[in-house]
Structure formats: C-alpha cells, structure tokens
C-alpha cells in the first residue's frame, strides 16, 4: 500500500499561460543519484519497467514512439542533465531537467508546454498533469525498489489504489490551475469532469 497523500504532496505543480500556450511544471525529489535517475528515464529496457515500451532512434534528431501512446522528435539531449522532445505533435514540447539534490538525491523538473491546449486556458493542464503524476509515481516506486519485477506498469493504471491516486492528482491539479488564474471557474470545472471520467471514472466533483 502506498501513502496516497504523501505521494501527491511529494510533487510541486505549477500552471502558467502565455497567449495560447499552456505550460505545466512539476518538481519532485528522488532518493537516487542523477546518473541513476537519468538511466531509468532513458534506457528502453528500464523504461518499460515503470512507464511503457518505447521504440525509435533515441538520439538527437531521431524520433521515438511510446507503445499505445504519444511519439515525437528528440530536439535536445545533455546527459545526465536534461532532454527536450516534441510529445504528440510539434506544438507540444516536453523537457525534463535533473539537478543534484541534498545527499544522494536528484531534483527532477518536468515541463510540458502545449501550444494548442485541449481545453480553454490553463484547464488544458488537466489533460496531461494527472498522467505525468502517474509516471512520476511509477518512477519513484521503481527507483526505491517498491515496484515488483513482474508488475506491468500499463496495467497498473487499473489498480484501485492507483485510481484513488489519480483522483487526488486531478484534485491537486484543479487547485494548481485555480491558483494560476489562467482560466474561468466554469471552464475549469468542465475540464475537471472530463479529466475525472478518464483517470478516476467513479469519482465526482
């Protein structure tokens, strides 16, 4: 069993908007060296253990495809500090940055900017934020050795405990969007209902 609120609170979430571009930023600390976190983030064999299978030419200028999910182009890569890719389209940019933390820890910062947000204003964050929350949780469980070797991370999305986590994630993003002042309450609640129906179907606002 995981402490859901502890895991939710382990992530800092921010939402901003510049013109039509909506950006989500997430920060989380991992108890592992940057080189270890980098390897887990970029090695295809390790990625399938906590995220999903990936294929493609994983070098600058190459492209990648996540099985059953988004693909994109690799724009920048500076091991073991950062990489930047398109994610699902040329106007959707994903960047991950790693910084050494206290002790043998790593500060991970994820930034996802959407030039064509799927919902008005900052409420578009509800389309990507909860999904990245799940990914960062999977990475944490993997790095700490809490993820059983025979676990399929894709199927984990259907576990009751993970669905409960997803619900709390959506609620955390609702508050982050409210705090950003980047959309109306009406648009936020409309997007929140759709997000909950995807990530936690039985939950209600």
Image: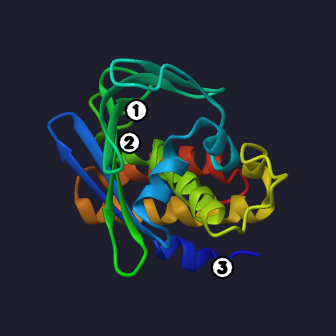
Tell me, yes or no, if residue 120 can be seen here. yes
Q: CA distance from mark 3 to mark 2?
A: 27 Å
- Residue at horizontal 67 percent and vertical 41 percent from the top: 48
Tell me the residue that label 3 is attached to. 3
Q: Is residue 61 left or right of residue 162?
A: left
Q: Where in the figure is residue 57, as x and y percent of width and height?
A: 48, 19
Residue 142, picture quadrant:
bottom right
Q: Earlier in the sequence, mark 1 or mark 2?
A: 1
Q: Please, is residue 9 above or below residue 143 in the view?
A: below
> Which quadrant holds residue 116?
top left
In this view, 145 is above or below 22: below
Q: How is the image coloured?
A: rainbow
> What residue is at 30 percent from the left and 62 percent from the top?
99
Please report contact status of discs 1 and 3: CB closer than 8 Å, yes or no.
no
Q: Residue at x 70, y 58 (%)?
A: 163
Q: Which mark is residue 124?
A: 2
Give the structural element (helix, strand or loop) at label 1.
loop
Q: Mark 3 or 2, which is nearer the eye?
A: 3
**How many angstroms separate mark 1 from mark 2 (CA)?**
5 Å
Mark earlier in primary sequence (1, 3): 3
């Amino acid at each position: 069993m995981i402490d859901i609120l502890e895991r939710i609170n382990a992530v800092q979430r921010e939402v901003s908007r510049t013109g039509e571009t909506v950006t989500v930023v997430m920060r989380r600390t991992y108890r592992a060296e940057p080189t270890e976190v980098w390897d887990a983030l970029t090695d295809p064999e390790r990625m399938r253990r906590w995220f999903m299978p990936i294929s493609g030419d994983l070098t600058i200028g190459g492209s990648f495809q996540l099985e059953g999910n988004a693909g994109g182009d690799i724009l920048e890569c500076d091991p073991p500090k950062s990489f930047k890719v398109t994610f699902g389209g040329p106007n959707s940019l994903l960047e991950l940055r790693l910084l050494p933390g206290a002790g043998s820890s790593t500060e991970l910062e994820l930034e996802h900017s959407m030039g064509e947000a799927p919902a008005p204003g900052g409420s578009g964050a509800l389309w990507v934020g909860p999904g990245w929350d799940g990914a960062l949780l999977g990475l944490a469980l993997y790095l700490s050795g809490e993820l059983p070797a025979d676990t399929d991370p894709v199927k984990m999305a259907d576990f009751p405990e993970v669905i409960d986590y997803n619900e709390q994630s959506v609620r955390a993003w609702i508050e982050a969007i409210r705090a950003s002042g980047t959309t109306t309450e009406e648009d936020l609640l409309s997007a929140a209902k759709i997000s909950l129906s995807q990530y936690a179907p039985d939950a209600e606002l």
